[in-house]
Amino acid sequence: MPSFGDGHAHPLYGGLEAVGPPVRQCHSVDEIVSAVGTYAAENPGEEWIVGASYDGSLAPDGLFDARWLDAAVPDRPVVLRAWDYHTVWCNSEALRRAGITADTPQPVLGEIPHRDDGSPLGTLREWGATDLVMAVMPPRDERLRIDALGTAADYYLARGVTWVQDAWVEPADVTTYVTAARQGKLRMRFNLALYADPRHFDSQVVHFAEQRRQVDEANSSLLTAQSVKFFADGVVENETGALLAPYCSGLHSHGGDNLGMRNWEGDSLADAARRVDELGLQIHIHAIGDAAVRQALDAIEHVVAHNGPRDRRPVIAHCQLVDEADLGRFAALGVIPNMQPLWAQLDALMTVLTVPRLGVERADKQYPIRTLERSGAPLGFGSDWPVSSGAPLDGIAVAVSRRTSEGDPEGGWTPHEILPIDDALSAYTSGVAHQAYATWGRIAPGARADLVLLDRDPRHTDPSELAGIGILATYLDGAPVYRAEN
């Protein structure tokens, strides 16, 4: 069949997870602390211990204490990203080097939770807070970063994926990709979405065309830079996803009037999107909450009205909550809802962190995949790897069942949103190819021969067994780039 594409992921971050303490598979805070301590002891020459990505549901309300890490590594800074990549857990030395104290004001577009005595806890939420630590961390070695792209390619090709949208690329990342391309070290297709920061957009936007030129001059058929990534909001689990109605009260000190966080105030997102569109770049907006989705749709509607019709294929990623009044606007505006089907299940993240924040009634409106597909919206799928599994068949298994890997609940969670298997396969192939302006994603004369050979036909496989389908081979432009070991 056509190979898969991943319409929203973070391959450089995913590859870098292989470097640092192995915390992703840890099932308790104690396991994480032990893994960090072991890694630090085995790497005495590393000034900073940096790793990803821990399970944010392992501590109450996702709040992790610096003192837990201090017990393992008191004398060197430790910085761990959570699996949502919107949250960082630091030890006390990392907080000290970043200058974060009880007197540090709450940053714009971020949150620093505190203990009862006023001292910073050790958890930092969203960019305004996490950037305080990132700004003082030494940069990663460039050879390590290029190797991480190889690690990401190994991961993806073994799962039948030949194209991925890197949905968060900063200037140093452009340099890494371009260097890797010039050294012939890219082994799959990457498109770069240049990060638009509302705090610095006016100075950023003047460099977007230059960054795209750098990619074009690398002259690699495997590397493009045609998109710009906006974050309209944060995530529900941090109560930073932007909602039309308040979060359920009692989880934090916000009371019952917390609507989350809008990263772009007033008309600024619409104005920024217009300027990006005028550069001929594709709009790609992270929008989790229903208020953020509406703001993203309003911004794209503004772009169409101001700049006129063209084949722009704007993307709104995640679409976790969409107000009923906005469901038909995707098709009307030609907006691609790039959704992460793996998330549409009642797993620990959902039951421990998400549902309590939204309430059951609103939680049951999440991930309206089938509804958007039926509306005529050009549905595409992505994984958000390494936030969650980058294996398309893992996501497809949930899309066609709305059940966990254990089979819960029987009949599926919100079963009216179950997607037929053919549509799920299309969303991960031709749907992503449409997003990419590409000719792969289908088997037809003139299409690129990006293919995957499976050991079973997913159209005739029980949903509970889809994730276990074997990838026998993956082909890029007709050439094998992965073969399963016998």
Image (cartoon, rainbow, N blue to C red):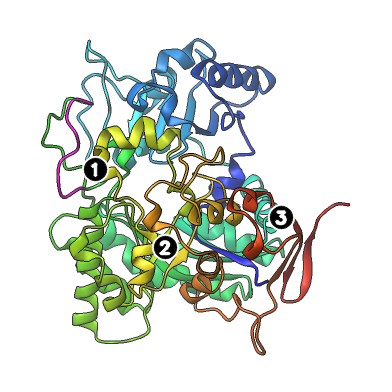
Q: Mark 3 or mark 2: which comes first in sequence?
A: 3
Neighbor class of circle 1 (other Cα within 10 Å; few <14, some 14-19, many 20+) is few
Residue 287 versus residue 127: which sits nearer the camera? 287
* Left or right of 207 in this view: 247: left
Identity, as a three-letter code, of the amino acid under mark 2: Asn
Identify the magenta region: 243-251
* Left or right of 69 in this view: 35: right
Q: Disc 3, disc 2: CB below 8 Å?
A: no
Picture residue at 38% right of the left edge, 23% below the top: 95
Q: Mark 1 or mark 2: which comes first in sequence?
A: 2
Q: Which residue in the rendered view is the most extreme toward the right? A: 486
Picture residue at 33% right of the left edge, 86% below the top: 310
Mark whose residue sits in front, 1 or 3: 1
Q: CA distance from mark 1 to mark 2?
A: 24 Å
Instruction: Give the structural element (helix, strand or loop) at label 3.
Output: loop
The image shows residue 220, relative to residue 405, as above or below, that is below
The image shows residue 126, relative to residue 7, as above or below, that is above
Q: Which residue is mark 2?
A: 338
Picture residue at 51% right of the left edge, 51% below the top: 398
Residue 403 versus residue 383: which sits nearer the camera? 403
Residue 421 versus residue 437: which sits nearer the camera? 421
Identity, as a three-letter code, of the amino acid under mark 1: Glu
